[in-house]
Image (spheres, rainbow, N blue to C red):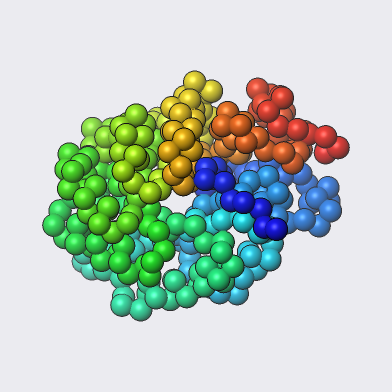
Amino acid sequence: MAERVPLIQVGTSGWHYPQGRGAWTRIVYPPPRARGGVDELTWYADRFRTVEVNASFYRDLSPDLTAKWVVRTPPGFEFAVKLHQQFTHPRMHAPSTRDLAPVPDPSPTALAASMDALAPLRGAGRLGPLLAQFPPSFQATPEALAYLSWLAEAVQGVPLAVELRHRSWSDARRETLALLDAAGAAWVLIDEPKFRSSVWQSPGVFVEELRDRPWAYVRLHGRNAAQWWDHEAAEDRYNYLYRPEELEPFVDVAAAAAALGKKLYLYANNHFAGNAVANAAQIRARIGDPVKAPFPRTFLDRFPHLEGIVRTEGLF
Protein backbone atom coordinates (compact mmCIF):
# COMPACT_ATOMS: atom_id res chain seq x y z
CA MET A 1 0.00 0.00 0.00
CA ALA A 2 1.37 3.43 -0.98
CA GLU A 3 2.24 5.83 1.82
CA ARG A 4 -0.43 8.44 2.44
CA VAL A 5 0.84 11.88 1.42
CA PRO A 6 0.42 14.33 4.32
CA LEU A 7 -1.59 17.51 3.89
CA ILE A 8 1.32 19.56 5.20
CA GLN A 9 4.40 19.26 3.00
CA VAL A 10 7.57 20.89 4.35
CA GLY A 11 10.88 20.99 2.49
CA THR A 12 13.56 23.23 1.04
CA SER A 13 14.02 25.21 -2.15
CA GLY A 14 16.51 23.05 -4.00
CA TRP A 15 18.70 20.19 -2.81
CA HIS A 16 21.98 20.68 -4.71
CA TYR A 17 24.29 23.44 -3.40
CA PRO A 18 27.80 22.08 -3.97
CA GLN A 19 29.86 25.27 -4.27
CA GLY A 20 30.61 28.57 -2.58
CA ARG A 21 30.72 29.57 1.06
CA GLY A 22 27.13 28.42 1.44
CA ALA A 23 27.64 24.89 0.09
CA TRP A 24 25.79 22.00 1.72
CA THR A 25 28.69 19.59 1.20
CA ARG A 26 30.01 18.20 4.51
CA ILE A 27 27.21 19.92 6.42
CA VAL A 28 23.89 18.54 5.19
CA TYR A 29 25.43 15.68 3.23
CA PRO A 30 28.26 13.46 4.36
CA PRO A 31 31.24 13.04 2.04
CA PRO A 32 30.43 10.89 -1.02
CA ARG A 33 32.51 7.98 0.29
CA ALA A 34 30.32 7.92 3.43
CA ARG A 35 27.02 7.86 1.53
CA GLY A 36 27.42 4.37 0.16
CA GLY A 37 26.85 5.54 -3.41
CA VAL A 38 23.60 7.32 -2.58
CA ASP A 39 23.23 10.63 -4.44
CA GLU A 40 22.04 13.90 -2.93
CA LEU A 41 18.43 13.78 -4.17
CA THR A 42 17.92 10.26 -2.83
CA TRP A 43 19.57 11.26 0.44
CA TYR A 44 17.33 14.32 0.70
CA ALA A 45 14.19 12.34 -0.18
CA ASP A 46 14.87 9.95 2.71
CA ARG A 47 14.46 12.94 5.04
CA PHE A 48 11.84 15.13 3.38
CA ARG A 49 8.76 14.34 1.30
CA THR A 50 8.92 17.32 -1.03
CA VAL A 51 11.34 19.73 -2.66
CA GLU A 52 10.96 22.93 -4.64
CA VAL A 53 12.97 22.74 -7.86
CA ASN A 54 14.91 25.96 -8.41
CA ALA A 55 17.19 24.84 -11.24
CA SER A 56 14.22 25.02 -13.62
CA PHE A 57 14.26 28.83 -13.26
CA TYR A 58 17.69 28.99 -14.93
CA ARG A 59 17.61 26.18 -17.48
CA ASP A 60 15.11 24.08 -19.35
CA LEU A 61 14.32 20.65 -17.96
CA SER A 62 13.92 17.53 -20.08
CA PRO A 63 11.69 14.45 -19.80
CA ASP A 64 14.82 12.30 -19.42
CA LEU A 65 15.96 14.32 -16.41
CA THR A 66 12.60 14.38 -14.63
CA ALA A 67 12.13 10.65 -15.30
CA LYS A 68 15.40 10.06 -13.44
CA TRP A 69 14.08 12.12 -10.52
CA VAL A 70 11.16 9.71 -10.26
CA VAL A 71 13.53 6.75 -10.03
CA ARG A 72 15.69 8.46 -7.40
CA THR A 73 12.81 9.28 -5.03
CA PRO A 74 10.22 7.16 -3.20
CA PRO A 75 6.48 6.94 -3.93
CA GLY A 76 4.61 9.93 -2.55
CA PHE A 77 7.53 12.34 -2.91
CA GLU A 78 6.41 15.63 -4.53
CA PHE A 79 8.28 18.12 -6.70
CA ALA A 80 7.11 21.72 -6.82
CA VAL A 81 8.70 23.26 -9.90
CA LYS A 82 9.62 26.91 -10.40
CA LEU A 83 8.79 28.20 -13.85
CA HIS A 84 11.66 29.31 -16.08
CA GLN A 85 12.58 33.00 -15.90
CA GLN A 86 11.17 33.65 -19.38
CA PHE A 87 7.68 33.30 -17.87
CA THR A 88 8.25 35.69 -14.96
CA HIS A 89 11.33 37.90 -15.42
CA PRO A 90 11.35 39.80 -18.73
CA ARG A 91 14.40 41.83 -17.69
CA MET A 92 16.47 38.68 -17.12
CA HIS A 93 15.31 36.96 -20.28
CA ALA A 94 15.23 39.80 -22.83
CA PRO A 95 18.23 39.92 -25.22
CA SER A 96 18.50 43.66 -24.55
CA THR A 97 16.58 46.42 -22.78
CA ARG A 98 15.27 47.46 -26.19
CA ASP A 99 13.40 44.14 -26.34
CA LEU A 100 12.03 44.49 -22.81
CA ALA A 101 8.26 43.98 -22.53
CA PRO A 102 6.24 45.35 -19.57
CA VAL A 103 5.15 41.79 -18.76
CA PRO A 104 6.68 38.46 -19.80
CA ASP A 105 6.15 37.55 -23.44
CA PRO A 106 7.15 33.89 -23.85
CA SER A 107 6.99 32.18 -27.22
CA PRO A 108 3.75 30.27 -27.92
CA THR A 109 5.48 26.89 -27.72
CA ALA A 110 7.73 27.56 -24.72
CA LEU A 111 5.23 26.74 -22.00
CA ALA A 112 4.04 23.61 -23.81
CA ALA A 113 7.65 22.40 -23.99
CA SER A 114 8.11 23.08 -20.28
CA MET A 115 5.00 21.11 -19.44
CA ASP A 116 6.13 18.23 -21.67
CA ALA A 117 9.37 18.06 -19.67
CA LEU A 118 7.30 17.50 -16.50
CA ALA A 119 5.24 14.65 -17.97
CA PRO A 120 7.21 11.91 -16.14
CA LEU A 121 6.58 13.61 -12.79
CA ARG A 122 2.92 14.11 -13.59
CA GLY A 123 2.49 10.55 -14.81
CA ALA A 124 4.05 9.15 -11.63
CA GLY A 125 1.92 11.35 -9.37
CA ARG A 126 5.02 13.27 -8.21
CA LEU A 127 4.24 16.73 -9.60
CA GLY A 128 3.11 19.27 -7.03
CA PRO A 129 2.38 22.91 -7.89
CA LEU A 130 4.19 25.10 -10.35
CA LEU A 131 5.70 28.25 -8.86
CA ALA A 132 5.61 31.57 -10.71
CA GLN A 133 8.00 33.83 -8.80
CA PHE A 134 7.66 37.40 -10.06
CA PRO A 135 10.19 40.17 -9.32
CA PRO A 136 9.37 43.42 -7.47
CA SER A 137 9.18 45.15 -10.86
CA PHE A 138 6.06 43.12 -11.74
CA GLN A 139 3.28 45.44 -10.60
CA ALA A 140 -0.51 45.22 -10.59
CA THR A 141 -1.35 46.69 -13.99
CA PRO A 142 -4.11 45.61 -16.40
CA GLU A 143 -1.42 43.96 -18.55
CA ALA A 144 -0.05 42.04 -15.57
CA LEU A 145 -3.51 40.92 -14.49
CA ALA A 146 -4.24 39.66 -17.99
CA TYR A 147 -0.92 37.84 -18.10
CA LEU A 148 -1.56 36.09 -14.78
CA SER A 149 -4.96 34.96 -15.99
CA TRP A 150 -3.42 33.57 -19.19
CA LEU A 151 -0.60 31.81 -17.34
CA ALA A 152 -2.89 30.09 -14.83
CA GLU A 153 -5.00 28.71 -17.68
CA ALA A 154 -2.00 27.75 -19.83
CA VAL A 155 -0.37 25.42 -17.28
CA GLN A 156 -2.77 22.66 -18.30
CA GLY A 157 -4.55 22.04 -15.03
CA VAL A 158 -1.45 21.92 -12.80
CA PRO A 159 -1.94 24.04 -9.64
CA LEU A 160 -0.12 27.36 -9.88
CA ALA A 161 1.42 29.20 -6.92
CA VAL A 162 2.04 32.89 -7.61
CA GLU A 163 4.68 34.87 -5.72
CA LEU A 164 4.08 38.63 -5.94
CA ARG A 165 6.53 41.05 -4.32
CA HIS A 166 5.33 44.57 -5.12
CA ARG A 167 2.94 46.35 -2.75
CA SER A 168 0.56 47.25 -5.60
CA TRP A 169 -0.75 43.68 -5.39
CA SER A 170 -1.61 43.91 -1.70
CA ASP A 171 -2.95 47.43 -2.19
CA ALA A 172 -5.40 45.83 -4.63
CA ARG A 173 -5.88 42.77 -2.41
CA ARG A 174 -9.51 42.05 -3.27
CA GLU A 175 -8.88 42.20 -7.03
CA THR A 176 -5.72 40.08 -6.74
CA LEU A 177 -7.49 37.38 -4.73
CA ALA A 178 -10.46 37.38 -7.09
CA LEU A 179 -8.21 36.82 -10.11
CA LEU A 180 -6.20 34.03 -8.48
CA ASP A 181 -9.33 32.36 -7.07
CA ALA A 182 -10.95 32.35 -10.49
CA ALA A 183 -7.87 30.56 -11.85
CA GLY A 184 -7.55 28.12 -8.94
CA ALA A 185 -4.12 29.60 -8.19
CA ALA A 186 -2.61 30.24 -4.75
CA TRP A 187 -1.10 33.53 -3.60
CA VAL A 188 2.23 32.59 -2.03
CA LEU A 189 2.86 33.81 1.53
CA ILE A 190 6.48 34.98 1.50
CA ASP A 191 8.77 35.95 4.34
CA GLU A 192 11.68 38.14 3.28
CA PRO A 193 13.26 41.50 4.11
CA LYS A 194 10.68 44.27 3.81
CA PHE A 195 11.20 47.55 1.98
CA ARG A 196 8.97 50.49 1.12
CA SER A 197 7.72 48.84 -2.08
CA SER A 198 7.30 45.33 -0.59
CA VAL A 199 4.02 43.46 -0.73
CA TRP A 200 2.16 43.43 2.58
CA GLN A 201 1.27 39.99 3.96
CA SER A 202 0.43 38.60 7.39
CA PRO A 203 0.41 34.95 8.52
CA GLY A 204 -2.74 35.67 10.55
CA VAL A 205 -4.61 37.17 7.59
CA PHE A 206 -3.28 34.35 5.41
CA VAL A 207 -4.92 31.78 7.70
CA GLU A 208 -8.23 33.64 7.63
CA GLU A 209 -8.16 33.74 3.84
CA LEU A 210 -7.21 30.06 3.67
CA ARG A 211 -10.59 29.11 5.09
CA ASP A 212 -12.15 29.86 1.70
CA ARG A 213 -9.42 28.34 -0.45
CA PRO A 214 -8.45 24.73 -1.21
CA TRP A 215 -4.66 24.89 -0.80
CA ALA A 216 -1.76 27.16 0.08
CA TYR A 217 1.93 27.79 -0.51
CA VAL A 218 4.54 29.40 1.78
CA ARG A 219 8.16 30.41 1.11
CA LEU A 220 10.72 31.52 3.69
CA HIS A 221 13.57 33.50 2.13
CA GLY A 222 15.21 34.70 5.33
CA ARG A 223 15.52 38.27 6.63
CA ASN A 224 19.03 39.27 5.63
CA ALA A 225 18.12 42.85 4.69
CA ALA A 226 21.74 44.07 4.77
CA GLN A 227 22.78 41.71 1.96
CA TRP A 228 19.50 41.41 0.07
CA TRP A 229 20.50 43.93 -2.61
CA ASP A 230 24.14 44.56 -1.67
CA HIS A 231 26.06 41.29 -1.72
CA GLU A 232 29.27 39.83 -3.08
CA ALA A 233 27.64 36.58 -4.20
CA ALA A 234 23.95 35.86 -4.83
CA GLU A 235 23.97 33.17 -2.13
CA ASP A 236 24.77 35.80 0.51
CA ARG A 237 21.23 37.17 0.55
CA TYR A 238 20.06 33.78 1.86
CA ASN A 239 22.55 33.72 4.72
CA TYR A 240 19.94 33.83 7.46
CA LEU A 241 18.89 31.30 10.10
CA TYR A 242 15.43 31.77 11.59
CA ARG A 243 15.25 31.73 15.37
CA PRO A 244 12.62 29.38 16.86
CA GLU A 245 10.34 32.29 17.80
CA GLU A 246 10.52 33.61 14.21
CA LEU A 247 9.32 30.24 12.90
CA GLU A 248 6.30 30.08 15.21
CA PRO A 249 3.93 32.12 12.98
CA PHE A 250 4.58 29.66 10.16
CA VAL A 251 4.16 26.68 12.48
CA ASP A 252 0.79 28.21 13.33
CA VAL A 253 -0.04 28.54 9.62
CA ALA A 254 0.79 24.86 9.07
CA ALA A 255 -1.23 23.78 12.10
CA ALA A 256 -4.21 25.87 10.98
CA ALA A 257 -4.06 24.42 7.47
CA ALA A 258 -4.03 20.89 8.90
CA ALA A 259 -7.00 21.69 11.16
CA LEU A 260 -8.90 23.07 8.16
CA GLY A 261 -8.05 20.01 6.05
CA LYS A 262 -6.16 22.13 3.50
CA LYS A 263 -3.08 21.08 1.55
CA LEU A 264 -0.10 23.32 2.29
CA TYR A 265 3.37 23.42 0.78
CA LEU A 266 6.04 25.21 2.84
CA TYR A 267 9.58 25.64 1.56
CA ALA A 268 12.59 27.22 3.25
CA ASN A 269 14.72 29.09 0.71
CA ASN A 270 17.33 30.45 3.15
CA HIS A 271 19.66 27.83 1.75
CA PHE A 272 23.06 29.25 2.71
CA ALA A 273 25.17 26.49 4.35
CA GLY A 274 22.14 24.33 5.16
CA ASN A 275 20.09 26.94 7.03
CA ALA A 276 16.97 25.92 5.11
CA VAL A 277 17.37 22.27 6.09
CA ALA A 278 17.73 23.21 9.75
CA ASN A 279 14.64 25.43 9.74
CA ALA A 280 12.56 22.92 7.75
CA ALA A 281 13.49 20.20 10.26
CA GLN A 282 12.47 22.51 13.12
CA ILE A 283 9.09 23.17 11.55
CA ARG A 284 8.56 19.46 10.93
CA ALA A 285 9.27 18.73 14.59
CA ARG A 286 6.96 21.50 15.80
CA ILE A 287 3.99 20.17 13.81
CA GLY A 288 4.50 16.64 15.14
CA ASP A 289 6.09 15.23 11.99
CA PRO A 290 9.82 15.03 12.79
CA VAL A 291 12.46 13.98 10.28
CA LYS A 292 13.24 10.36 11.12
CA ALA A 293 16.33 9.54 9.07
CA PRO A 294 19.66 10.66 10.58
CA PHE A 295 21.93 13.49 9.53
CA PRO A 296 25.73 13.57 9.63
CA ARG A 297 27.28 14.92 12.80
CA THR A 298 28.60 17.88 10.83
CA PHE A 299 24.98 19.03 10.63
CA LEU A 300 24.68 19.20 14.41
CA ASP A 301 28.11 20.79 14.62
CA ARG A 302 26.73 23.72 12.65
CA PHE A 303 23.26 23.65 14.25
CA PRO A 304 23.77 22.46 17.85
CA HIS A 305 20.33 23.75 18.84
CA LEU A 306 18.87 20.86 16.81
CA GLU A 307 20.13 18.35 19.36
CA GLY A 308 17.10 16.19 20.17
CA ILE A 309 15.25 17.36 17.04
CA VAL A 310 17.30 15.39 14.51
CA ARG A 311 19.30 12.16 14.87
CA THR A 312 22.91 11.48 13.92
CA GLU A 313 23.20 7.78 14.76
CA GLY A 314 25.97 5.94 12.99
CA LEU A 315 26.93 8.82 10.73
CA PHE A 316 30.24 10.63 10.44
Q: Is residue 29 visible?
A: yes
Q: Quadrant of the C terminus?
A: top right
In the rendered image, residue 265, in percent from the top left (x then y), is placed at 48, 46
Q: Residue at x 40, y 48 (%)?
A: 215
Q: Residue at x 38, y 39 (%)?
A: 190
Left or right of 20 on screen, residue 164: left
In the rendered image, residue 246, in percent from the top left (x then y), is placed at 47, 24
Residue 112 or 233: which is nearer the viewer?
112
**In the depicted structure, whether residue 255 falls above or below residue 271:** above
Residue 287 or 227: which is nearer the viewer?
287
**In the depicted structure, whether residue 207 falls above or below residue 138:** above
Q: Residue at x 34, y 39 (%)?
A: 211
Left or right of 315 on screen, residue 138: left
In the rendered image, residue 142, in percent from the top left (x then y), is placed at 13, 57
Choose top left, top right, bottom left or bottom right for residue 2. Answer: bottom right
Choose top left, top right, bottom left or bottom right for residue 271. Answer: top right
Residue 89 or 36: which is nearer the viewer?
36
Q: Residue at x 35, y 79 (%)?
A: 109
Q: Is residue 90 visible?
A: no
Q: Which residue is most to the bottom?
A: 109
Q: Quadrant of the N terminus?
A: bottom right
Q: Which residue is most to the left?
A: 142
Left or right of 154 on screen, residue 298: right
In the rendered image, residue 91, in percent from the top left (x then y), is placed at 29, 59
